[in-house]
């Protein structure tokens, strides 16, 4: 089971979700285009349309670029399967992966898009997180907000 799961969540006034997938090299887990018909609760077509484009994909699933970057990262002085990567280092690694897509992400933000790096954390009884200026600057430079969800389900089958 992974220590954390990271998702990139994008809302945009008009972009085609396929363009996001192509530019990032990721397939969305959920997506819809601005103006497309909403799905009603019973699965049928609703009478309204989505006001904006929505797109979300997991960054921590196997096969995306993270594998190369994170392969050698583990907490200093820790070894073995149970060694947990510190959250701050995990966040930095996710931002570093996204830097190669920075021009595209900044364009979306400039066009009125809302971009969020969403991280699901295991349940922790005590939790303290310090986000240094370098990490916050990296997120801001990409036009990304950060969302941390503690106690989120981390099983791959959810």
Image: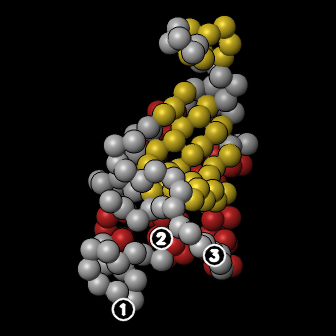
Quarter-of-image position of residue 142: bottom right
Decide which of 136, 101 is in the foreground and name it.
136
Question: Residue 119, position in %: x, y?
Answer: 53, 58
Image: 121 above or below 39: below
Q: Can you tell which mark lies on residue 32?
A: none
Which residue is tagged 1? 77
- Is 131 positioned to the left or the right of 74 in the image? right
* Element under disc 2: helix
- How far, Cα to Cα, is label 1 from label 2? 16 Å
Which residue is tagged 2? 90
Question: Residue 85, position in %: x, y?
Answer: 42, 75
Q: Nearer the viewer, mark 3 or mark 1?
A: 3
Cβ–Cβ below 8 Å for labels 2 and 3? Answer: no
Report the residue at 45% width, 57% height from top.
Answer: 5
Quarter-of-image position of residue 12: top right
Question: Residue 93, position in %: x, y?
Answer: 47, 70
- How far, Cα to Cα, is label 2 from label 3? 15 Å
Decide which of 139, 25 is in the foreground and name it.
139
Report the residue at 47% width, 70% height from top.
Answer: 90
Q: Which of marks 1 and 2 is nearer the N terminus?
A: 1
* Element under disc 1: loop
Decide which of 83, 71 is in the foreground and name it.
83
Which residue is tagged 3? 128
Cβ–Cβ below 8 Å for labels 1 and 2? Answer: no
Report the residue at 63% width, 49% height from top.
Answer: 115
Decide which of 9, 78 is in the foreground and name it.
78
Q: Earlier in the sequence, mark 3 or mark 1?
A: 1
Q: In which quarter of the image is the C terminus?
A: top left
């Amino acid at each position: 089971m992974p220590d954390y799961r990271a998702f990139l969540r994008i809302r945009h006034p008009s972009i085609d979700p396929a363009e996001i997938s192509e530019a990032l090299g990721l397939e969305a887990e959920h997506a819809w285009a601005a103006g497309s018909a909403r799905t009603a609760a019973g699965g049928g077509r609703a009478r309204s349309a989505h006001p904006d484009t929505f797109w979300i994909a997991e960054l921590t699933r196997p096969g995306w670029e993270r594998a190369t970057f994170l392969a050698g990262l583990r907490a200093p002085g820790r070894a073995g399967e149970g060694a947990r990567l510190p959250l701050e280092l995990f966040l930095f690694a996710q931002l570093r992966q996204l830097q190669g897509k920075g021009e595209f992400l900044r364009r979306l933000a400039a066009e009125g898009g809302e971009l969020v790096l969403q991280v699901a954390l295991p349940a922790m009884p005590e939790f303290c997180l310090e986000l240094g200026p370098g990490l916050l600057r990296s997120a801001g430079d990409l036009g990304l907000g950060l969302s941390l969800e503690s106690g989120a389900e981390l099983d791959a089958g959810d």
